[in-house]
Amino acid sequence: MFNHETTKRVRYGETDQMGYLYYGNYPLYYEIARTEMIRSLGMSYKEMEQSYRIMMPVMSLNIRYVRPALYDELLTLKTSIRKLPKQFITFHTEIFNEKNKLVNGGAVKLCFIDIKSNTTIRTPEFLVQKLKPYFENS
């Protein structure tokens, strides 16, 4: 399993009238988490698109709300890839508040698209090779 952690502070413009992180903004936090996770592997979404001509559209999103995240709280985004991806990749993210209490959790499933042919492809080999060491003892 591959795990990654990053932080994000709740900004005023991301909150609702109650000072809670607006429920529709959680997917943006998931995107931050998976973008930083990919970056921790030594690559970026931009590189995958420009150099490898691969895009990763979202296929499904599941969210569970546990407690509110509050304005100006520093949240910890813990993301994992639980299985070495073959056709699809799923990022599981849990968001914790400053008291280390679970705020929210979700899973985002993405596929891989070859930009030139606009067709789905298997997980690119360069990504499999970067992830493989995290799954060798599984």
Image (cartoon, rainbow, N blue to C red):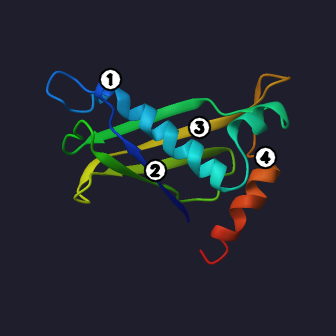
Query: Considering only order in the chain, which callout, 3 or 2, is on the residue closer to the N terminus?
Result: 2
Between tags 1 and 2, which lies in front?
1
Q: Are marks 2 and 3 in contact (CB under 8 Å)?
A: no
Query: Considering only order in the chain, which callout, 3 or 1, is on the residue closer to the N terminus?
Result: 1
Seen at 41% across and 44% down, the residue is 8
- Secondary structure of the residue carrying tag 1 is helix
Query: Considering only order in the chain, which callout, 4 or 3, is on the residue closer to the N terminus?
Result: 3
Q: Which residue is mark 2?
A: 92
Lateral position of residue 51 relative to residue 94, left or right? right
Q: Are marks 3 and 4 in contact (CB under 8 Å)?
A: no
Q: Which residue is mark 1?
A: 13
Percent x, y for residue 47?
A: 77, 38
* Vertical order, 126 against 47 (above or below): below
Q: Are marks 1 and 3 in contact (CB under 8 Å)?
A: no
- On residue 110, the disc is 3
Q: CA distance from mark 1 to mark 3?
A: 28 Å
* Vertical order, 102 against 60 (above or below): below
Q: Amino acid at mark 1?
A: Gly
Query: Considering only order in the chain, which callout, 4 or 1, is on the residue closer to the N terminus?
Result: 1
Lateral position of residue 17 relative to residue 22, left or right? left
Mark 1 packing: few (<14 Cα in 10 Å), some, or many (20+)?
A: few
Q: Amino acid at mark 2?
A: His
Seen at 34% across and 38% down, the residue is 63
- Secondary structure of the residue carrying tag 4 is loop
Q: CA distance from mark 3 to mark 4?
A: 13 Å
- Secondary structure of the residue carrying tag 2 is strand
